[in-house]
Amino acid sequence: MSNLDQHPLAVADPARSKLTLHHSRQLMIAALVLLGVGGGARFIFNHQQALALENRTQESLIRTVIVTQAREGDLKRSVALPATLRGNTETGLFARSNGYLASWHKTIGDKVKKGELLAIIDSPEQDQEVAQARATREQAKAKFGLAKSTAERWEALRQHEGVSQQELDEKRASLEQAQADLAASEANLKRLEQLQAFRHLVAPFAGVITRRNAEIGQLVSAGGKELFGLTQIDPLRLTVWVPQIYASDIKTDKAININLSEFPGKKFTATIEHIAGGLDPQTRARQIDIVLPNPDGKLLPGAYAEVGLSLNSSVKSLVVPSSVLIISSDGPKVAVVEADNKLSFHNIKLGRD
C-alpha cells in the first residue's frame, strides 16, 4: 500500500510524535511555573498593599492637637472714660459794693497770690455813708454817757429816799436804750466799713486769672456781672462717672492713666481721691474725683482728657487664649486632654476678652 492510501489518523513516525509530546509538556510546565510565580508575586504585592493601607488607616485615626496651659488670674478689665480737666479750686469774682471800676491790676494768664489786689472800685456814696455812720455813733455815744451818769446819780438819790423807785426805773431804762442805740450805730458803722473794704477786689487763693470782664469806668453793682475768673491749676481735678458694671471695682488712692490728644504717646498719672457712696439713679453711674498733679502748668483747665481705668475683680478665674473656645448651641466649651490622652469637652462660663 502506498502513502496515499494511509489513514489520515495513522502515525507516520512514532519517534517524532513522541518528541513533540515531550516539548508540549515542558511548555505546559513552564507556563504553570510562570503562573505560579506571577500569582505568588501578586499575592505578596497585594499583602504589602493591604498592610500599608492598614498602617495609613491607623495613622489617620490618630489626632494631633496643639495644647496650651490655662493659668490662674484675676478678671482684669480696662475702660476709657471721657473727662474734662478743671482747676483744683475755681471761682468767679464779683463786686460786693456799688460803684465804678477805678482800676484793674491783673489780667488773663497772670499768676496771683492769695490776698493780692486785682481791682479797685470807686464809690463816693459809701464814703459819705461811712462819715454819716460815724457821726451817728458819736451821737449815740454821747447819749449813752449822759444816760449812764444820770442813772448813777439817781441810784445815789434813791439810797437816801430822794427819788421814787418809778423814777429810778425810768432812768435805768433810758440807760439801756442809749446803750442799745450805741451798739446799733457801731454795728452799722462796721457794716459800711466792710462794704468800703470790698472796694478792693483781692484774690481769695493763689491761682491764675482765666477770665477778665472788668474795664476802667465800668459801672458795677453788688452781685452783678462777674469781673474775674480765678483757677488753681496745681493740682488739677477730673470728675468721671463710672458705669454700674465697673462701679464696684473702683478703689481710692489708686493710680490711673490720663491721656490727652495734645500730648500723643504720653501718659499722665493721677490718683483717685474720692468715690461716691452710691450710684446716680438716673445715669446708673458712680462719681469719682481724680487729682492730677500739674507742677509745671502745662496742662490747661477745660481741656478734654481720656481716663484709663484698669480694674481687677475679686473673682478668681482661669485665663486661656480665645482660640481654644468652641462655640456650640449649648454654650461655649473647651477641649481638655485627659491623663489617658483622650479629649473631653467641658462647658465653661466666659468672663471678659
Image (cartoon, rainbow, N blue to C red):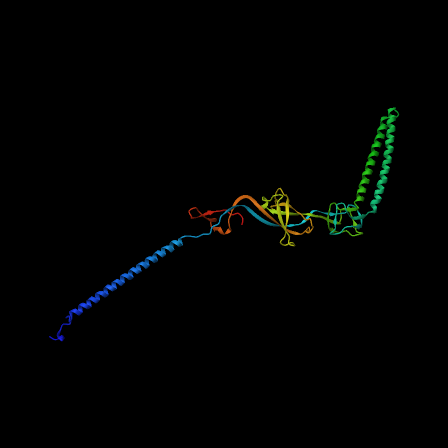
Image height check: is 135 above or below 81?
Answer: above
Give the image location of residue 76, x and y in percent.
56, 47
Q: Nearer the viewer, residue 260 or 189?
A: 260
Image height check: is 206 above or below 156?
Answer: below
Which residue appears farthest toward the left when viewing the image? 1
Q: Nearer the viewer, residue 167 or 50?
A: 50
Q: Residue at x 57, y 48 (%)?
A: 77
| Residue 165 image-quadrant placement | top right
231 with respect to 137 (left or right): left
Give the image location of residue 305, x and y in percent.
64, 51
Q: Residue at x 50, y 52 (%)?
A: 323
Quadrant (top left/top right/bottom left/bottom right) for the N terminus: bottom left
Give the image location of residue 255, x and y in percent.
62, 46
Give the image location of residue 122, x and y in percent.
82, 48
Which residue appears farthest toward the top when viewing the image? 160
Q: How many numbered marks are there?
A: 0
| Residue 152 image-quadrant placement | top right
